[in-house]
Image (spheres, rainbow, N blue to C red):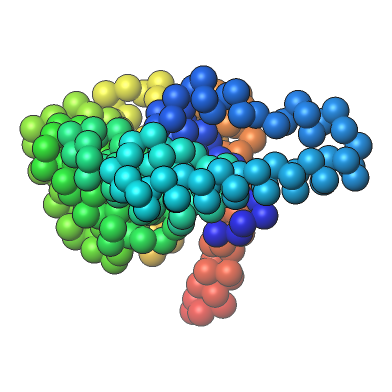
Amino acid sequence: MPQSKPDEPFVRKVFKALVLVVGAAMFLSFSFGPILQALGPSDSQDTANLVTEQLRAQADGYRAVLEREPDNPIALRGLIDTQLQLNEPQGAIEPLKKLVELEPENRQLRAFLAQIQQDTGDLEGALEQLQILHEKDPKDSQVLQELADVQLALGHPSQAIELLENYLKEVPEDNDVRLRLAFIYVRNNQTEKAVALYDEMIAADPSDFAPVLGKAIALSSATDENLRAKAPELFEQAARLAPPKLREQIRQEAELSAQRNQPQAVESQETAP
């Protein structure tokens, strides 16, 4: 992960997590954005450097406290906070682990640790934390989906599929999980299963653009040319049903899909008798 400029999704995750772990008041009171905007480029850079130095000094102070009192929750939370503000999430993992050890029933903390581990590439560590969360509450669909995503990222699609299928036997109406399962079917080249699941959701709610878009993506990646030919119409239908802010993005995806499939179409024409 680049240390100079994190991507937007990670920034949003960190903001939510900071509010969760150290409290909104503490985090928002330590905002330097307005100060930096009010200064010129040179002053702004100097101020940014000063802020970084102050944060590093704070982190060192928290570490010194933890050497004497390794279970001090205030120092642990403070170190987590400063490491994230420094955009050094790797340095937040160990104090987070300690905090989770001290508060084993705090699901939000454990979920935050799993998220940071995912973002820093420790998928095995994230898997361990998510499995603990899932075992304690198998009906938590958000944890379930995160767990399936990690299984998929680790190259275990069959385990991810089994996990979601078993959940849907108990909670068949959970469309978020059904969408996730259909997506994994597509990733695992099980297009027929994905399309069948999308069709069920479309029949249940024809106004929902998500399963229509999912079906379009599934068909656009199918090996059968006749199935691929149905994708453009579905992309357009999804764009009509989607909120206005998403329509252009869906149409761009449709164009990319058409471009990806064009060489296959040309090749099939060249080899036709």
Relative to 35, is 16 on the left or the right?
Answer: left
Which residue is nearer to you in this view: 34 or 149?
Answer: 34
Position of the N terminus by quadrant: bottom right
Residue located at (62% from left, 57% from top): 3
Q: Residue 273 appears at what percent x and percent y? A: 49, 79
Relative to 54, is 221 on the left or the right?
Answer: left
Which residue is nearer to you in this view: 31 or 191?
Answer: 31
Whether residue 107 is visible, yes or no, is yes
Q: Vertical placement of 158 versus 147: above or below? A: below
Q: Vertical placement of 49 versus 123: above or below? A: above
Q: Residue furthest front?
A: 68
| Picture quadrant where residue 43 is located | top right
Relative to 130, is 2 on the left or the right?
Answer: right
Q: Residue 190 appears at what percent x and percent y? A: 26, 57
Relative to 124, is 33 on the left or the right?
Answer: right
Which residue is nearer to you in this view: 126 or 258?
Answer: 126
Q: Residue 271 appears at what percent x and percent y? A: 51, 79
Residue located at (51% from left, 20% from top): 25
Q: Residue 127 appears at what percent x and percent y? A: 25, 55
Which residue is nearer to you in this view: 195 or 145?
Answer: 145
Whether residue 191 is visible, yes or no, is no
Residue located at (61% from left, 44% from top): 55
